[in-house]
Image (cartoon, grey):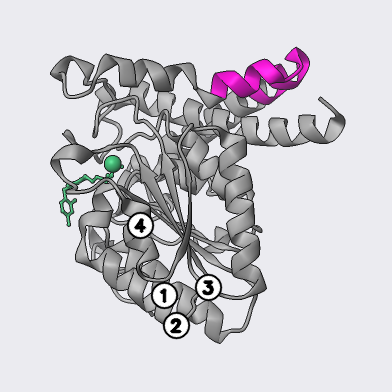
Amino acid sequence: MDEQDIDLTARLYQKLRLIRRVEEEIAEIYPTDRIKSPVHLSIGQEAVSVGVIDALEPDDIVSPTYRGHAAYLAHGGSVEGMFAELFGKVSGCAKGRGGSMHLIDIEQGILGASAVVGTTIPIAVGYALALKHQRTSRLCVAFFGDGATEEGAFYESLNFAALHDLPILFVCENNGYAIHTPLNKRWAKDALCDRVQSFGIAFDAVTDGDVFSIRNTAKAAVAAIRSSPTPRFLEIKTHRWREHVGPGCDDHVGYRDPEETAFWRKRDQVDRLQSMLPEETYLLIDSQIEARIDRALATAEADSFPEAKDLSLHVFAD
Ligand SMILES: Cc1ncc(C[n+]2csc(CCOP(=O)(O)OP(=O)(O)O)c2C)c(N)n1
Ligand SMILES: [Mg+2]
């Protein structure tokens, strides 16, 4: 690998590893009851957020879902703010009122996530409309799961974005399941991209989980949106390693074929990129990540809970 390749690999690895380690830490802490909300982990899915967001500029806008730790961290969301939010503390990124499903960091360009499936898609479209009115070259990325594409709001959003040529990249993180229900029990035809194309929206699909393919595909889509505002769509196949909600695994339930799991585990991008880097490079990255997590956990632990008298604050905009 030449120096440029090492830099790119190290940058992607740093984000993949940070997300993996933060979520492993969450899984470890969860049984202690210090985390005050449900958690939807993206372990196994990190490459989607990391690849797509690496194709963006820092001032672009990202709209995550309730399974949003990866997109939040990949776009520079504060680790302190995230742990404090999970602990329900005042310095949390949503002031301790939202928990894991409602991460937000407006300064970093991260719109608020929501527990209600599909609802963030039209909000991201609204943000893209605002960006178009401001005549900037910035764009908005809406992340959502395969289940969210079954909501009417998804199709209304595609239509509105196409009609008004909005600078938005729709990214479907297709992990093949909505809770325990697979695509073949939900979709009459497994042809999501064809449905999207019928709105006049160009698409690309990445099926092998390769973080470099995801990044390159996103880069091409982002360049097309910047050159002439228009929505684009990416379907990225991926695999959730853990249970739908919570810190554990639910393979014993038997709703997924073990071969499917084995296929994706072999393609783990955290291990893969680590094996591509010189040992001293990844060891340094790993130790910096551990120190960052330790610091963030200590800060979040030491912080206080919101006071009952402040219950009605932050409900309406000032
Ligand atoms: C409007 C709405 N309907 C149903 C639910 C219950 N629910 C929570 S997560 C989920 C599955 C969503 O699947 P997908 O969009 O593929 O995301 P994933 O969990 O796989 O990341 C459902 C049905 C909800 N939260 N909101
Ligand atoms: Mg899904």
Q: Amino acid at mark 2?
A: His
For the question of whether residue 117 can be seen, the reply is no
Give the x, y percent position of residue 34.
30, 31
In this rendering, is residue 300 above or below 218? Answer: above
Quarter placement of the N terminus: top right
Of the two numbered discs 3 and 2 on the same chain, state the one appearing first in sequence: 2
Give the residue drawn at x 69%, y 36%. 11
Give the x, y percent position of residue 13.
63, 30
Residue bounds of the magenta highlight:
270-286
State yes or no: residue 156 in magenta.
Answer: no
Q: Which mark is residue 164?
A: 2
Q: Nearer the viewer, mark 3 or mark 4?
A: 4
Q: Which mark is residue 230?
A: 3
Give the residue drawn at x 24%, y 48%. 147
Q: Which residue is mark 4?
A: 194
Q: Amino acid at mark 3?
A: Thr
Camera-nearest residue between 201 and 153: 201
Per the model, the C-alpha gap separating discs 3 and 4 is 17 Å
Taking the image as four quarters, which one is ligand 2 found in?
top left
Give the residue drawn at x 14%, y 39%. 185
Q: Amino acid at mark 4?
A: Asp
Camera-nearest residue between 244 and 84: 244
Give the residue drawn at x 69%, y 19%. 276
State yes or no: residue 279 in magenta.
Answer: yes
The reply to whether discs 1 and 3 touch (Cβ–Cβ < 8 Å) is no
Q: Which residue is mark 1?
A: 161
